[in-house]
Image (cartoon, rainbow, N blue to C red):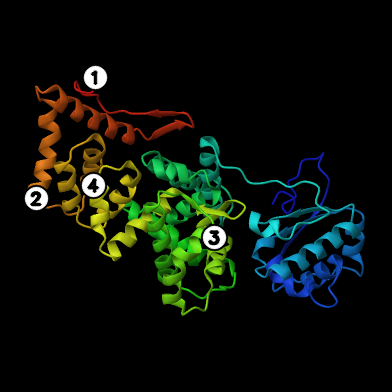
Amino acid sequence: MTYAQHRQPPQALKLIPVLLYLREIRDQITSQQPPTLAELVTNRVRVKDEQPLQPPPQWFEKKLKQGQCLVMLDGLDEVAEESQRQQVSQWVDTQIRNYQETAFILTSRPFGYRDAQLKQVGIVLEVQPFNFKQREEFLHSWYLQNELISQARKEDPGVRMTAAKKANDLIERLKKFPPLIEMGCNPLLLTMIALVHDNRGALPGSRVELYGEICEVLLIRRQQAKGVPDRIQLDVRQQKSVLQVLALKLMVQRKLDFTPAVGVPIIQHQLAAVTGNQIQPKQFLQHIENVSGLLVEKELKLYKFTHPSFQEYLAAAQVKETNQEQLLVDNINNPWWHETIRLYAAQNEGTNLIRAALANPTVTSLTIAYDCLAEDNWVEPRVRRQLETKLESDLESQDPEIFKLAAQVQLSRRLKSSTAFLDDHLEIDLSYITCAEY
């Protein structure tokens, strides 16, 4: 962008930026007689819809040979076929050899590069998680650019004020919600959160709605917007139904990651039910990782959901759809199930879960019960009153064991509510501390 707008500093080389989307040119460069980079760029600028250019013969050839261009090749991973992707890599290698004075930048998600690495590349860089400051900088920059594009105007104080207001609103909302703070370390997921926030003017009223919208953006809308062809032809509901089975099974097995050997048997039956054996389980898992980004390959052949919250959300949805509430009741004292139980309670009646916690009161079960109540879904009035009065009365109890349990529950809930992040290592809680907690 700096080069395209002639804003490079005086000491920087004067380069002509050339941006090519590999998914758009893959057929040309994998043909029997692929064009050279100079021929390809020349042909493309001549057929531009708006303001086609007519460079003199050999003009780009000369500029590339002299190192006067910055060539940016976007999205190696979006060349879906592995054999074609390897051909594209070979073509790029050839161009780097032919134009040794030219600076090349190629982008790809990791999976797309692992199987089609370039021999001529000198430096490989990987995107790292955002820290607290970077998250805020990203959101301010994202909203500013978004406002400039949506309003089709130049940067001025009014645009900057609107963008800053929106960015600050989202930042404040994130501070109150720890799972979103964690998700925000991932640039892709932070972008999804910002998209949802910008479309609505706010975040959805519940986490369940937010996770659902982000899943939809990742599974379908993102590749539609980018024009990436859908290789598996499954809608959001079908893809989610398969991922829900996988998520719940992983929760039962107390796992966050899995190998294809583990994942394939889990999803095989449900995938066959929605596709009629037209798509193989390995192909489905690769698609979800490669295209949507809802799964990631953390190590070679070791997958996991991009964030544990998605696994918990999808597992909760599966419990609801298959009427397996008893599974959650049986695990009311298991911290591993805390978020799944809470997400289930956000979309279903929580009476039985709270009743189970009251029947077996521990710090874990009562903390989960109060969190279920906080989801503000329907709970049988008598059970609701019983839970609401229990903590208050137990904090006044003369029985040291009952008092201690109530105080620990109160402290446990406080730790979960201390979410106003000041930086990556510090949180702040602005509510008063009770005598019991003290």
Q: Do tag 2 and tag 3 residues touch (Cβ < 8 Å)?
A: no
Q: Disc 3 residue type?
A: Pro
Residue at image mark 2: 381
Who comes first in sequence, dot 1 or dot 2? 2
Residue 357, percent from left and from top: 19, 43
Who comes first in sequence, dot 4 or dot 2? 4
Who comes first in sequence, dot 1 or dot 4? 4
Q: Disc 2 residue type?
A: Pro
Residue 22, percent from left and from top: 71, 65
Considering depth in this image, is 368 or 381 the residue closer to the camera? 368
Looking at the image, is 140 positioned above or below residue 45? Answer: above
Looking at the image, is 125 positioned above or below residue 237? Answer: above
Local SS, label 1: loop
Residue at image mark 1: 438
Residue that protrudes farthest toward the left in the picture: 382
Residue at image mark 3: 260
